[in-house]
């Protein structure tokens, strides 16, 4: 093998590889095998590479001459056992030349039906100290020589470079495919816009909004912005291209195919060339539902704040240490504080020690998971009042009790009304009793007075008895006046109801 021929073979190999539109292991192995067979005059041979990850030897193409000549059953192009001549080359990373393979101790023979091997030459394809493949030839008419071995080793080195490049290229293609699939199937719209504001790429997520890709690519960004947002969006775009910095987030309304709009949240970055921005790449997330939810939450919060602050009852939230976290205006009125000054205060700051201790004991039950209701007379800031207090535990998402929610109602007036109502009922009873009693006494007095008159008329001329009967009549009339006066006073007291 002359150096010139060897150089020509190398150039031919590289040329074939570079001219391949889509180079792969099969084409590359076929091309190099064709060259080394011709240059060495070998009728048989193979070129194979080791699979990344598994270490299996894959021979993508066996020679056309070998296939018809081989009578083996269950032929395979994938090998994971290396107990033969080419296996020795792969495992040891060394070339092998034998013109009597049947006598070579490294040979395990050939399977039944395989063509007879009478001469064998092989070289490992090694790059960066790692075996990535093998070139093998067999049955040259003349014996193989050291020159043949040197030639095959050099060609194996070139094959190693091509295999290494193909491995890297395959990894890159897989990575790019995965990345493309990720980009295409992400829930967000992914886009690329050039420096003129023209869309160059858009993933298939635009289909969710009624568009085909071709209906978007090639059009200006401004065409899809809401009329009220268009100036704002284009200003942000031009500023980014001018300054080389994009906004952290850009939220605006984007046109759908049906003429409606969705709320988009855009995050982007710049593609630079020689320090200048030439394109913008970014993602648009549909936040329509999120915006609606946030708006509803805001409205609900405002409504709750209005209810909280306008409630007549005192509403408060306390932490597990007894500090007030929040309180409404009614709560502040009890303590003589504005609502914004309530956070951070404790009951000890306003209540007598005994009352503060009672409240603390009650709240221990609440922190244990109970809802309590207490009614007690309290003296706060020198004012004696009666309060009804409901306390409930507030739990976090994990079920842990974090706060105490309380509602306090001043029932001092209610207690006073209850007392007055009880007094009024007592007076009504007295009225009924006195009315009946006075009626009965008056009847009795009338009887006494009537009989006294009859007896007085029946005993004329008896001055002594007549005098006694007049005393009786005078006493009965006085008793009647007293009874009537008592009855009138009881009725007057019943009419004068407390207010």
Image (tube, helix red, strand yellow):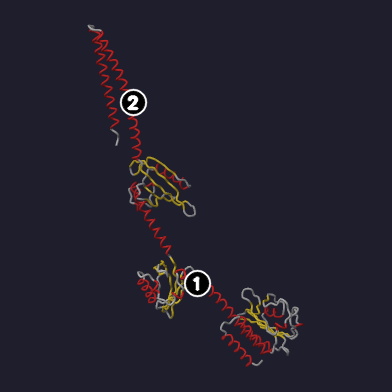
Q: Please say if 157 is above or below 74.
A: below
Mark number displayed over residue 201: none
Q: Which comes before the other along the chain, label 2 or label 1?
A: 1
At label 1, counting other C-alpha atoms closer than 10 Å, the crowd grade (few under 14, some 14-19, many 20 or more) is: some
Q: Please say if 68 is above or below 177.
A: below
Camera-side residue: 239 or 293?
A: 293
| Quadrant assignment for the N terminus | bottom right
| Quadrant assignment for the C terminus | top left
Q: Please say if 439 is above or below 93.
A: above
Residue 461 located left or right of residue 205: left
Question: Hey, which residue is sitting farthest right in the picture?
Answer: 103
Determine whether the residue tagged by mark 2 lies in a helix, strand or loop. helix
C-alpha separation, residue under disc 2 versus residue under disc 1: 95 Å
**Residue 154, image x, y percentages:** 64, 86
**Residue 421, image x, y percentages:** 34, 35
Camera-side residue: 424 or 47?
A: 424
**Residue denoted by label 1:** 184
**Residue denoted by label 2:** 433
Residue depicted at x 29% and y 25%: 487
**Residue 48, image x, y percentages:** 65, 80
Residue 475 located left or right of residue 302: left
């Amino acid at each position: 093998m002359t150096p010139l021929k060897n150089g020509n073979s190398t150039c031919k190999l590289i040329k074939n590889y570079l001219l391949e539109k889509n180079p792969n292991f099969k084409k590359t192995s076929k091309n190099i095998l064709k060259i080394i067979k011709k240059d060495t005059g070998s009728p048989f041979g193979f070129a194979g590479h080791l699979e990344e990850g598994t270490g299996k030897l894959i021979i993508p193409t066996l020679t056309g001459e070998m296939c018809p000549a081989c009578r083996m059953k269950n032929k395979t192009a994938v090998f994971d056992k290396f107990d033969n001549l080419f296996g020795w080359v792969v495992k040891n990373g060394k070339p092998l030349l034998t013109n009597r393979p049947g006598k070579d101790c490294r040979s395990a023979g050939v399977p039944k039906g395989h063509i007879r091997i009478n001469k064998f030459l092989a070289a490992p394809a090694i790059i960066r100290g790692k075996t990535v493949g093998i070139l093998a030839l067999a049955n040259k008419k003349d014996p193989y020589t050291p020159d043949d071995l040197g030639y095959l080793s050099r060609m194996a080195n070139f094959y190693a470079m091509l295999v290494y490049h193909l491995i890297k290229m395959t990894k890159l293609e897989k990575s790019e495919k995965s990345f493309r699939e990720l980009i295409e199937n992400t829930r967000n719209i992914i886009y690329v816009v050039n420096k003129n504001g023209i869309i160059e790429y858009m993933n298939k997520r635009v289909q969710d909004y009624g568009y085909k890709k071709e209906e978007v690519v090639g059009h200006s960004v401004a065409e899809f912005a809401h009329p009220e947002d268009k100036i704002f969006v284009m200003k942000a775009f031009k500023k980014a291209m001018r300054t080389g910095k994009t906004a952290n987030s850009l939220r605006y309304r984007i046109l759908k195919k049906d003429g409606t709009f969705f709320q988009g949240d855009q995050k982007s970055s710049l593609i630079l060339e020689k320090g200048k921005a030439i394109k913008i790449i970014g993602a648009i997330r549909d936040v329509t539902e999120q915006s609606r939810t946030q708006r509803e939450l805001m409205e609900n919060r405002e409504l709750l704040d209005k209810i909280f602050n306008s409630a007549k009852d005192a509403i408060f939230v306390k932490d597990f240490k007894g500090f007030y976290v929040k309180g409404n205006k009614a709560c502040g009125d009890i303590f003589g504080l504005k609502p914004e000054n309530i956070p951070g205060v404790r009951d000890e700051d306003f209540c007598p020690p005994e009352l503060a201790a009672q409240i603390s004991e009650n709240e221990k039950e609440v922190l244990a998971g109970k809802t309590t209701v207490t009614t007690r007379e309290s003296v706060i800031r020198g004012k004696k009042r009666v309060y009804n207090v409901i306390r409930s535990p507030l739990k976090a998402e994990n079920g842990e009790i974090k706060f105490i929610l309380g509602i306090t109602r001043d029932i001092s007036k209610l207690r006073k009304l209850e007392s007055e109502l009880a007094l009024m009922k007592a007076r009504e009873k007295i009225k009924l009793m006195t009315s009946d009693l006075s009626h009965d006494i008056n009847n009795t007095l009338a009887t006494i007075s009537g009989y006294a008159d009859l007896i007085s008329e029946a005993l004329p001329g008896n001055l002594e008895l007549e005098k006694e009967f007049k005393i009786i009549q005078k006493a009965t009339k006085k008793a009647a006046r007293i009874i009537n006066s008592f009855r009138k006073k009881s009725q007057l007291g019943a009419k004068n109801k407390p207010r």
